Amino acid sequence: MSLPVIHLLPHEERRLLAGHLWVFGNEIDTQKSPPGRFASGDPVILADARGRRLGVGYINPHSLITVRLLSRDPDTVIDTRFFRGRLEQAIATRRPFGIERFGRLVFGESDRLPGLVVDRYGDYLVVQVTTAGMERWRDEIRDVLVDCCAPVGILFRNDSEPRKLEGLPGEVEVGWGTVPESVTVEEGGRVFSVSPWRGQKTGWYYDQREHRLRIAREAPRGRVLDAFSYVGGFGISALAGGSREAVLIDQSEEALERARANAAANGLPIPRTLPGEAFELLRALGEAGERFELVIVDPPAFIRRRKDQREGLLAYERLVTRAARLVADGGWLVFASCSSHLEPHDFRVVFARGVRRAGREVRIVAVGGQSPDHPIHPWIPETAYLQVLYGVIEEK
Ligand code: SAH
């Protein structure tokens, strides 16, 4: 079977030859190959202006990212075997880190499977399909996952935002076996109960794993404040490391309830939980004169698109200021950003400015990024999104 060909305009192949996997609508020769002739998700061969074939992928004429490449070998047949190969490769990449049973098995473009995310929770897999192209291969992907991982259940958590842009329905459904209301994550000797059905993302943030482990190992003991705590990953890790008291902030009551249960399940002190808006609550804690040896702030992305840059930087700075006021002399402020459009230098600048506005001094003793089960595609900056700064906060 030969696939239809999408032709690029002259010179538009350069980024792809360098290693990128995306083609934007304005890079396509619409005279030679009008995208409108295709249905969302149709497989295509990609060729440069001279007809040289660059690879095989899928098209969505309604998406800004019009073509995504699955393989640079244009003769690759996209079938069960193809997906098995990619999945085995993804699993092998994670094996040295010992995170195949509790970790992200597939991270989209970074694993050369654009539009697909697979998170593993022991016997259960939670899958997110975010593009019309990947949706076509849903059954093949399920079969390969059943073969490779022998799960008890697979949940398709297909209710993410990007699906809407692709014209796909939002749905959460079991794709194989059975999937319980809650599943358990094991991490650093601790257990966390999460909901794959209703939790954030697929239920858990594996990308922060190394930072939670580091907090348990190295952070100053005493009181810990975990802002944007979700189900308590950071606060509970700090308690496990020897913090004697935790305060958790999140706008989700349900997440906080889980956090308390998670602390109990690990035999740790039950955190004080403050439901509500974190900016407000941080300010209130500051006005009440509260101090913590360790403050962790892990907000959602404030810079989702380039045009959010100015507003987003200001929001980060404001949040740093409110958090820095709460840190005891010599304590740590651990501050995370998951905005892929935030340059590391800019992040350090807003961190330093925010601390200064709080009338404090900071030295950055460590910086970090996402866990190795979220590999970075060197040509796709969007895949490098998590940054974490560890600042020691002192009086002037
Ligand atoms: N630190 C967590 C992940 C945090 S996810 C971990 O390692 O597992 C971000 C969390 O912030 C979500 O639980 C969401 O409910 C919460 N949130 C988002 N905006 C908020 C706000 N303005 N105030 C309080 N919580 C907020």
Image (cartoon, rainbow, N blue to C red):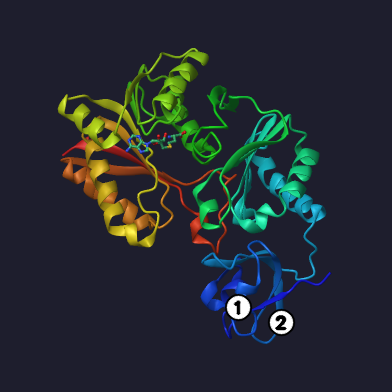
Does ligand 1 reach within 8 Å of label 2's beta carbon? no
Q: Which residue is mark 2?
A: 52
Q: Which residue is mark 1?
A: 13
Q: Are marks 1 and 2 in contact (CB under 8 Å)?
A: yes
- Identified by mark 2, the residue type is Arg
For the C terminus, give its image quadrant: top left
For the N terminus, give its image quadrant: bottom right
| Vertical relation: 5 (above or below) 42 | below
Would you say 311 lies left or right of 219 here? Answer: left
Q: Where does residue 224 sit, x and y in percent of width and height?
A: 34, 25
Would you say 148 lies left or right of 282 here? Answer: right
For the residues labelled 1 and 2, the Cα–Cα distance comes to 10 Å
Q: Residue at x 61, y 74 (%)?
A: 35
Q: Residue at x 56, y 22 (%)?
A: 191
Q: Nearer the viewer, residue 174 or 298?
A: 174
Q: Nearer the viewer, residue 258 or 59?
A: 59
Q: Quadrant of residue 17?
A: bottom right
Count of labels shown? Answer: 2
Q: Is residue 349 visible?
A: no
